[in-house]
Image (tube, rainbow, N blue to C red):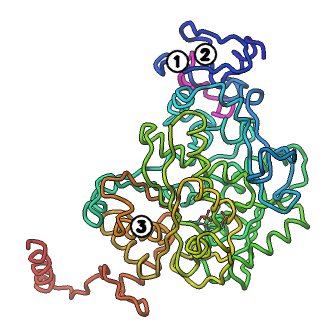
Amino acid sequence: MASSSLFQSLPFSLKTTKPYALPKPAANFVIRAQSPLTQNTNAASSASKHRRPADENIRDEARRINAPHDHHLFSAKYVPFNADPSSSTTESYSLDEIVYRSQSGGLLDVQHDMDALKRFDGEYWRNLFDSRVGKTTWPYGSGVWSKKEWVLPEIHDDDIVSAFEGNSNLFWAERFGKQFLGMNDLWVKHCGISHTGSFKDLGMTVLVSQVNRLRKMNRPVVGVGCASTGDTSAALSAYCASAAIPSIVFLPANKISLAQLVQPIANGAFVLSIDTDFDGCMQLIREVTAELPIYLANSLNSLRLEGQKTAAIEILQQFDWQVPDWVIVPGGNLGNIYAFYKGFKMCQELGLVDKIPRLVCAQAANADPLYLYFKSGWKEFKPVKSSTTFASAIQIGDPVSIDRAVHALKSCDGIVEEATEEELMDATAQADSTGMFICPHTGVALTALFKLRNSGLIKATDRTVVVSTAHGLKFTQSKIDYHSKDIKDMACRYANPPMQVKADFGSVMDVLKTYLQSKTH
Ligand SMILES: Cc1ncc(COP(=O)(O)O)c(C=O)c1O
Ligand SMILES: N[C@@H](CCOP(=O)(O)O)C(=O)O
């Protein structure tokens, strides 16, 4: 590549900054970062500090200002998942093809041109990503698209469908850590404090953006469909609605929360309530998408994981690029645990950090095929028939991403744990009592943490991140049942039911005095 064309197509313009030593156009050069203070990194900090003209929106502004960089420099394609790099197979597909499985029927993975990305050193990427946080520059105001070069480098900014998802709070669980675990470096990554209330937004912005692009290219995509335990369908229908793309969702009848059910209904999706479980819905959507021009939006589609992996990058960024010891992720269909691994691994390979954390995947005991596989010493995988769990979004017995999860866990010395219904509900209530308001799936992850602390594997001083995957407000019925002590065979040890009191001053004073006395001892 000629040096001048490289200069023009850098991910951010360096042209107006102090003298920059342009590298010789050698094949294997690495571009080192400038001081962040001298960077001209995006539209918000570009030459003009004036507000954009009143008749221009942020998409127009991006079209005018953002360099048409990454369309040329970086690229990605589908390849068979975990294919032997030394084998002679050259099977690969453009991301503009509609393909979910390899020729052999295995999973696919999005493979980035790592050589192109490696032309920029770790400091460069750290500075670039840091420079985009907290801005409204299209599309970098999103925590996903602020890493666009690593996600979907070739998509045009105009085609992106984003709600500025990501950049979620990394919450220091000070009281919970101290009170229940004797830990002072415990964090909860609140991926559920998001546009539709779960981490699915991170993947869905990528998938729906790509569909938007395909439709503009007149590819045969009439609608987008998924099977769901509630969160994927909520995210899919919201992103589709904002881009006027039809969405179709297959839901297991009576197995998702009311708050989740109402989301696709309100967003205008075509909602099918099917008398089966999630695995049954997944089977059906796979058959249907093979027959009809409906694009598959579940995480079997590896595009989704490109967005989800940015949560891992964000965690490192929020720790100022220091690596935590442990990251605990609740697992169901098992795409997310691999997405976290991939995000961390890319940061290591591209020199942003020098190691990756150990991952823990946490499952509900009522839907624990990965846990059983792990406990067998990875000998034999058997899908299970899942049973009802309060962690309803992970009630999945035959996860499509099993191979991805096993690869991720083996590569980082990972662990699988499980939680009974009582354990996960108690952990949820304990977390809530310290000011959080978490979903039951996060309760599953916290139970795993309790167990690993008790066994001594996770030490009191280990920096540990628990990934909270959905907003607690989606799961209020389970909290009401727990605090009403209305759950069969469950002690509900941390229940805090409201006190019924007569409407007179004396009665109110009596209960208040008793309460205050209990607090002063
Ligand atoms: C709230 C919540 N937590 C965790 C998961 C598990 O994620 P994954 O299916 O990627 O393992 C899901 C969906 O499956 C979910 O909706
Ligand atoms: N919890 C998921 C289950 C489907 O997972 P996906 O990541 O494969 O879409 C949901 O909310 O539907």
Q: Which residue position holds label 2? A: 14
Q: Which residue position holds label 1? A: 34
Give the Cα separation between the discs numbered 1 and 3: 41 Å
Q: Residue at x 61, y 55 (%)?
A: 201
At label 1, the amino acid type is: Gln
Residue 401 picture quarter: bottom right
Give the Cα separation between the discs numbered 2 and 1: 9 Å
Q: Residue at x 74, y 27 (%)?
A: 73
Out of 23 and 519, give the one closest to the viewer: 23
Out of 204 and 493, give the one closest to the viewer: 493
Q: Which mark is residue 446?
A: 3
Query: Taking the image as four quarters, which one is ligand 1 found in?
Result: bottom right
Q: Earlier in the sequence, mark 2 or mark 1?
A: 2
Out of 192 and 163, give the one closest to the viewer: 192
Query: Magenta stretch?
Result: 42-61
Q: Nearer the viewer, mark 2 or mark 1?
A: 1
Q: Where residue 433 sits: x, y (%)? A: 31, 69
Give the Cα separation between the discs numbered 2 and 3: 45 Å
